[in-house]
Image (spheres, helix red, strand yellow):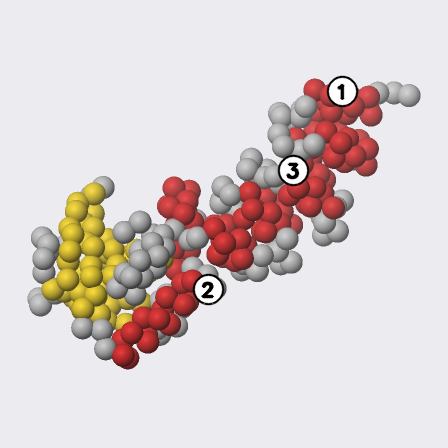
Amino acid sequence: MNGQSDGSSRGARFAAGLPAILHLQKNDYECVAYNLSRTGALVVGRFPNLAGYRVEVTFRYPQGELSVRLAGRVVRAEHEDGDDHLALEFMELDAEKQDTLEILLARIIEGLSPAPIEALRPGAPAQEVRRALEQVPLPHRISLATRATPREREFLCQDRHPQVLEALARNPNLRLPEARSLATVPHLQPSTLELLSRDPRWVNDEEVNCAIVAHPRTPLVLARKIVEKLETPAIKKLIQRPGVPPSIRTQLQRRILPR
């Protein structure tokens, strides 16, 4: 169960990261489902030894009331990083449950609001955010970034993939504080920095411009162009800022020398 489509008769798998409940005869166990497919799933949580057992699991989509309870057989059980990992093979799927499962998978594939991101708490630790982002396929993260809500943008700005960050820069609802923060992210491509520098929403914002000039991936031509329009107070701040290329620092110093 590797979270990728395997093209086999077992069906394509998707890194779902859905909230789930494992049902046993006497207890229910909160868990998270990964690698969800039409034929099985990987559930992670704290469970008793269930290798070979028949169990039931309820999968829930975070937004709305969509859920489905399915029976499955535990085909593999492993303990890793303090959690139990159970590989399930679905059993006894009638037409109604198959239809609901298809709808659930369609929600995940569309990436309208990926479950791993939805499950994050505001202010979640960076490591937790990165794990959640890695569970969402790259095309879905790129698509989401172009229309993400403020809550989703909080997490997507921590993405390390340049295409996601560029899509985020194109988001029409991006706010000035977010643009200022985005301009400092080290994983930006030169094209994203160029895009930020031309955006009419903050083309004249001192903080955005200074961040772009000091960014290690900013082309020198772009940095020089920005420096030419900076006012003296911004130039003095930028001279003290680490990361400014020596040639640009020299240009800045010349700008404030007495004529």
Which circle's residue, 3 or 2, is located before the other in the chain? 2
Residue 88: where, in percent of width, then height? 20, 59
- The disc labelled 3 sits on which kind of residue? Pro
- Cα distance, mark 1 to mark 3? 22 Å
Q: Dot 3, how many residues are within 10 Å of its Cα: few (below 14), some (14-19), or many (20+)?
A: some
Residue 137 vs residue 57, the one in the foreground: 137
Q: In the structure shown, which secondary structural element does the residue marked by tag 3 occupy?
A: helix
Residue at 48% from the left image edge and 56% from the top image edge: 140
From the image, tell me which residue sits under label 2.
110
Residue 247: where, in percent of width, then height? 73, 21
Q: Quadrant of residue 55?
A: bottom left
- Cα distance, mark 1 to mark 2? 50 Å
Residue 233: where, in percent of width, then height? 76, 32
Residue 214 vs residue 205, the one in the foreground: 214
- The disc labelled 1 sits on which kind of residue? Thr
Q: Quadrant of residue 222?
A: top right
**Residue that protrudes farthest toward the bottom in the picture:** 96
- Cα distance, mark 3 to mark 2? 29 Å
Residue at 70% from the left image edge and 29% from the top image edge: 238
From the image, tell me which residue sits under label 3.
190
Contact? badges 1 and 3 (CB < 8 Å): no
From the image, tell me which residue sits under label 1.
250
Q: In the structure shown, which secondary structural element does the residue marked by tag 1 occupy?
A: helix
Q: Is residue 185 above or below residue 143?
A: above
**Residue that protrudes farthest toward the right in the picture:** 259
In the picture provided, is 100 more to the left or to the right than 139? Answer: left
Q: Dot 1, how many residues are within 10 Å of its Cα: few (below 14), some (14-19), or many (20+)?
A: few
Q: Residue 181: in sight, yes or no?
A: no
Residue 241: where, in percent of width, then height? 65, 27
Q: Mark 1 vs mark 3: give the one in front.
A: 3
Which circle's residue, 1 or 3, is located before the other in the chain? 3
